[in-house]
Amino acid sequence: EAQVTQNPRYLITVTGKKLTVTCSQNMNHEYMSWYRQDPGLGLRQIYYSMNVEVTDKGDVPEGYKVSRKEKRNFPLILESPSPNQTSLYFCASSIMGGTNSPLHFGNGTRLTVT
Amino acid sequence: AQSVTQPDIHITVSEGASLELRCNYSYGATPYLFWYVQSPGQGLQLLLKYFSGDTLVQGIKGFEAEFKRSQSSFNLRKPSVHWSDAAEYFCAGAGGTSYGKLTFGQGTILTVHP
């Protein structure tokens, strides 16, 4: 089954403790992206990747890192999480370029930073 | 700055009534435009998309949207709403100098009364 898989679904952590949210897709998509969803703000793009080893900042990249060493994986790294990063995070992928092909979304990761 | 705005945070309709959800965009050139739907606890699913050509686009689940350049709008419509349409709806756009960056509106929560 074609899908985008994020892990974990729920994560509670403390300020400053490094964490990684994994994202994997099995559709051979070139484009992958991370979003955070906050009430009243919709989804805001954190980082995106047009292909392996090609990443770029979205609208809210501060406090986050990503890497794209393989086509299928696009982990989101929080080196030193802070409470304002408490949010619902979505990973998404598409065939090529986020602008001309629809996104396939994962089921989300709800992160709480205390 | 490029942006997508959904003026209505929450809309309530009766089952069987018609529906129109508003979306306005601000881009230098004609953007790619999308409507996504999010059911509780789920990721987003694409309803329809507009790239060029016919300004009235048909999507899944009986939804349609009309691109109006003169009004910078891309409103989503459905002639008869079903209770299962209750969800949050997001308009999104991309284009211009932001290839790869997809900007979402704030979302509109739809409640359907029996």
Image (cartoon, coloured by chain):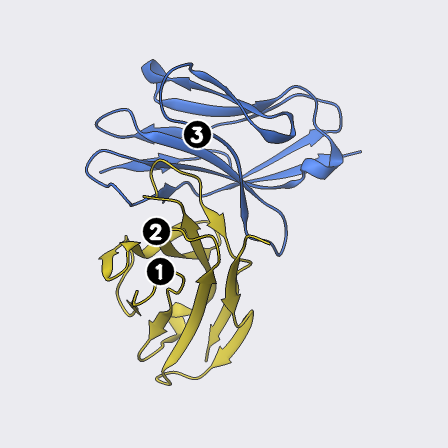
Chain colours: A yellow, B blue
Are the residues tagged 2 and 3 within 8 Å (C-beta)?
no
Give the image quarter of residue A107.
bottom right
Marks 1/2: CA distance? 7 Å
Residue matched to label 2: A30
Circle 1 crowding by C-alpha within 10 Å: few under 14, some 14–19, many from 20? many
- Name the kind of residue labelled 3 in the image: Cys
Where does the N terminus of chain B fall, quadrant-wise?
Answer: top left
Give the image quarter of residue A85.
bottom left
Mark 1, secondary structure of its residue: loop
Q: Residue furthest left?
A: B97
Mark 3, secondary structure of its residue: loop
Residue A75 appears in the rendering: yes
Where does the C terminus of chain B fall, quadrant-wise?
Answer: top right
Circle 2 crowding by C-alpha within 10 Å: few under 14, some 14–19, many from 20? some
- Name the kind of residue labelled 1 in the image: Lys
Residue matched to label 1: A71
Residue B23: give its label.
3
Q: Residue at x 36, y 82 (%)?
A: A18
> Quick check: do tags 2 and 3 share a chain?
no
- Name the kind of residue labelled 2 in the image: Glu
Residue A38, placed above or below residue B97 = below
Marks 2/3: CA distance? 29 Å
The chain that hosts pointer 1 is A
Residue A66, placed above or below residue B28 = below
Q: Residue furthest right?
A: B114
Residue toward you, B67 or A112: B67
B66 on left or right of B100: right
Q: Which residue is drawn at 45% across and 63% down?
A: A24
